[in-house]
Every structure is written in C-alpha cells, then in structure tokens.
Amino acid sequence: MNKIVNIVLKILLRLFLFACGAFAVTFVIYILNLDMKLTAKMEPVLFWFYDRVKRDQHL
C-alpha cells in the first residue's frame, strides 16, 4: 500500500511542479509583453502575405 501512495505522491508532485513552471513561464511572457513584441516582429511578413491574397472586387 505504501508503494502505491508513494507513486501517487510522486505523480502529484511532478504535476504540481509542471503547473508552477508553466505558470512562471506564462507570467514572464505576460509581464514582459513578449507576445505583442513577437507579433510586431511578424507584422511585415503577415502584411506581405495579406497583400498577396486575391480578392473579389465586386461591390
């Protein structure tokens, strides 16, 4: 019985540590506004692609 409890506790500890790590990473991304900085870097590529899309010009 102790082996099962030990395994379950190890799994729960690993899940908790993973959740804390994921939270820390997303918190740093949010605080430093890294998502919008990445979007600003991608903007020229997105505009280039958007400008090449064929459009129906009928009104």
Image (tube, rainbow, N blue to C red):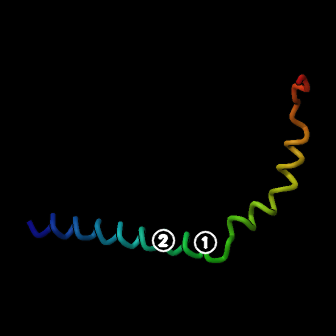
Q: Secondary structure at mark 2?
A: helix
Disc nearest the viewer among 1 and 2: 1
Residue under pointer 1: 30
Task: From the top left corner, tell me how far across and down residue 40 is, in percent.
Answer: 80, 63
Mark 2 surroundings within 10 Å by alpha-carbon count, few (fewer than 14), some (14 through 19), many (20 or more): few
Q: In the image shown, does 18 or 27 lie closer to the viewer?
A: 27
Looking at the figure, which quarter contains the N terminus? Answer: bottom left
Q: Is residue 13 above or below residue 56?
A: below
Task: From the top left corner, tell me how far across and down residue 39 is, in percent.
Answer: 75, 60
Which kind of residue does numbered mark 1 sit on? Tyr
Task: From the top left corner, tell me how far across and down residue 46 is, in percent.
Answer: 82, 49
Task: From the top left corner, tell me how far across and down residue 20 is, in percent.
Answer: 43, 73
Mark 1 surroundings within 10 Å by alpha-carbon count, few (fewer than 14), some (14 through 19), many (20 or more): few
Of callouts 1 and 2, the N-terminal one: 2
Could you tell me which residue is drawn at 48 percent across and 71 percent down? Answer: 23
Number of numbered markers: 2
User: Distance from label 1 to label 2 (Cα)?
Assistant: 10 Å
Residue under pointer 2: 23
Could you tell me which residue is drawn at 90 percent across and 22 percent down? Answer: 58
Which kind of residue does numbered mark 2 sit on? Phe
